[in-house]
Image (cartoon, rainbow, N blue to C red):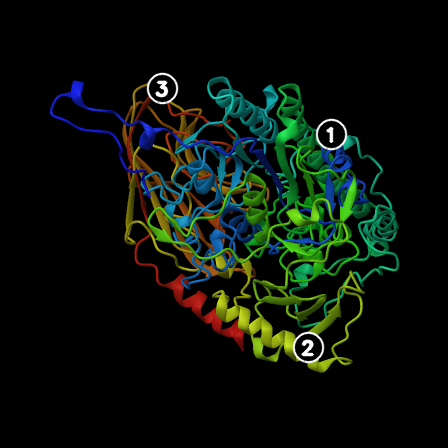
Amino acid sequence: MPKPFKGVIKVDVRESVPDWDPYVPPRAPEGAPNVLIVLYDDTGLAAWSPFGGRIRMPTLQRLADKGLMYSQWHTTALCSPTRSCFLTGRNHHQNGMACITEGAIGYPGANAHIPPECGTLAEVMRKAGWSTFWLGKNHSVPVDDLHAGSTKETWPLHQGWDRFYGFLGGETNQWYPDLTDDNHRIDQPYQPEEGYHLSKDLADQAIQMIRDVKASAPSRPWFTWFCPGANHAPHHVAQEWADKYKGAFDDGYEAYREWVLPQMIAKGVLPEGTELTPLNPMPDGTYSPLDDVRPWDSLSDDEKKLFARMAEVYAGFSEYTDRQVGRIVDYLEQTGQLENTLIFYCADNGASGEGSPNGSVNENKFFNGWPDEMEENLKHLDDLGSPNTYNHYPTGWAAAFSTPFRMFKRYSYQGDICDPMVIHWPKGIEAKGEVRHQYHQAIDVVPTILECCGLEFPETLNGHEQVPLPGVSMRYSFDAGDAPTQRERQYYAMLGTRGIWEAGWKAVAVHGPTSGIGNFDQDQWQLFHTDEDRSEAHDLAAEHPNKLKQLIDIWFEEAEKFDVLPLDDRTPHEILAEPRPQPEPPRETYVYFPDTAEVPESVAVNTRSRSFKILAEVELTSPDAEGVIFAHGSRFGGHALFLKEQKLWYVYNFLGVPPEQQFVSDKLAPGKYVLGMEFTKESTGEHGEALGTTKLHVDGQVVAEGPMRTQLAQFTLCGDGLCIGRDSGDAVSGEYKAPATFKGGTILQVEVNVGDDQYVDLEKEAAGMMARE
């Protein structure tokens, strides 16, 4: 409620009495801390050195030595859902975030639209006197709201954040990121050959934001959420950082598991007697084969070299980013702010198995259901991590970095949800360098921050009655290492997997995510006594059937309470292809003009698995006219129409698999033209790709023709949108260098026609029914 005016108002201002109190900006409580959350992606408990792993994290180690490590801190098993818990303090289904935003479906717990009844912590802190900054990954904006014409109500600046600098979506190219500054898209400030990397850029921006607010309001605390692209694919880092780990993973992922478990026990992260779980623990028929791990001794020598190098690149990426976080911490120390800054340094889910058993040089193949071929992967042995790859390590490393647990990201076992966390706050924590074993989950972060800052979540926020916070503050554990856990229970549900923890016992349904199996009523459940068996090595379901039934019943109670149903275990390309609300009704022809912001793929014309035409009205005023007319995607999947050497080119880059599919005209003289191409779908390939014929047109005349294949699913999970007159970020074709801005003429408009192609919809429906048989 606004403060009432207590002054006196008369006709004459000289007889009136002012009251400034209702208009003075709020001030945080005296001595309130700054808050810094560093949230990595895709990192298992066994990856980082403070927890026993081989990846050196000097900044994290520095904070752990003077702070606390948490061994039983849990997430939701996926990024958007976990991040929504950090945003609001509510369970992910309460936030409508059952899955990533790109996988939303039209149900209360799964629509990817955070309801106003689940207000954000940032909004509460801003109203209480904190400056609020969000940097890096934002995976919380619904795909139907990503475009320039949206209301922006789900964008950071409308969610309580004063500033935002980063990317909207699940991942981005670390060399050529898809950047947003506050409420508008921007180009990156400089290029990789000039030293650009997203992790460095984000640290630069974070320091600048904090510096700016302290210059004008030195007593005002700040709340900063720093979300680097690490350790999500693509694993991008300069060669010298990957080379720091040469040979470190040559012994393989099974040997790593055997090595790291004793290290974790010695660090106090796991209790004595903790056992390793099997490398491939899922029974046949209960999960996707894409989650299999190939035994190290079954690999060829070349495959071992490739897989080891993929781990080296991942490790270098992680450490390089930690060094950038270190620059922020150094700045806070130099300016006297570190002592009273509450820092959470953690990860949003377990190590990622989305690289498939063979690893990948283009992670987008996973989302297209396209197999990774070892011959192609080996060609990139010497340039992994460079702009030439969109790489991801194989499932074996996901299992290794999630030691000693079963499985990895997306599942409901500990390997998927038990992740590293360090809390550092010199002014508020007396204990130093200790490990805490209390059971906590992502929804507990918001209550912890509120208690440490002397705040309460209001019952009403921006006119909306608020849903009570279901989590508990972790502050009781700061200086009471032996204090009993204050949580009572926590449910888990992700992409068809299920789990429930209560009072040291946990039940898990044996059902793999994104497996397409369905038949959830036939699931077998396992039972683990996690107080005695931290790694969930021993299934006690047969010994304690009543306990198991009790926990299963509790899971259904929680599912009803928090809008968890329906369960969805469809394959990635099925989920991503789910029809979702669009800002504009579907139409046969989409018209685009030059000099506009790139159009996100979620709202751009959909040419996937269908026939389509691209027609551009242009006037060439110079014989040297060149550049991009139309571009959508990147070198890892996309297509482009452009001029080069006075010729019209159309290139379809199918998932980055060489060679590029190219169609080229003869030379064009200056003049007015209608330039374009037409793809006619004729059949479907083994993996769902569209097969057909492409014709290149100049003024209606066919000037080149040949067979072509197009992708089943998206060009990228996010970013690399549709551009006219330029190609933002990473170039679609190796025939030009982005941005390749069109010059030597004028583009009047570009039309993309998809017609009334019902074939793809009928085919998809038939495939879906067959998958359920």
User: In this figure, which residue is indicated by the disc labeled 3?
Assistant: 623
Disc 1 element: helix
Location of residue 286 in the rendering, given as x and y in whole percent from the top left corner: 66, 71
Disc 2 residue crowd, few under 14, some 14–19, many 20+, Cα 10 Å: many
Disc 1 residue crowd, few under 14, some 14–19, many 20+, Cα 10 Å: some
- What residue type is disc 3 on? Pro
Q: Is residue 252 left or right of residue 674?
A: right
Mark closest to the chain's N terminus, 1 or 3? 1
User: Which residue is drawn at the image coordinates 38% and 49% (left, top)?
Assistant: 144
Disc 3 element: loop
User: In this figure, which residue is indicated by the disc labeled 1?
Assistant: 241
Distance from disc 1 to disc 3, alpha carbons, whole Å, reads 45 Å
User: Which residue is drawn at the image coordinates 54% and 73% (left, top)?
Assistant: 557
Q: Is residue 727 left or right of residue 528?
A: left
Distance from disc 3 to disc 2, alpha carbons, whole Å, reads 76 Å
Of badges 1 and 2, nearer the viewer stands: 2
**Residue 8, can we see it?**
yes
Location of residue 153 in the rendering, given as x and y in whole percent from the top left corner: 36, 44
Mark closest to the chain's N terminus, 1 or 2? 1
Of badges 1 and 3, nearer the viewer stands: 1
Disc 2 element: helix
Location of residue 442 in the rendering, given as x and y in whole percent from the top left corner: 60, 52
- What residue type is disc 2 on? Leu
Camera-nearest residue between 625 and 158: 158
Answer above or below: position of 112 versus 721. below
- What residue type is disc 1 on? Trp
Distance from disc 1 to disc 2, alpha carbons, whole Å, reads 47 Å
**Residue 652, can we see it?**
no
Q: Image quadrant for the N terminus?
A: top left
Q: Quadrant of residue 665?
A: top left
User: In this figure, which residue is indicated by the disc labeled 2?
Assistant: 548
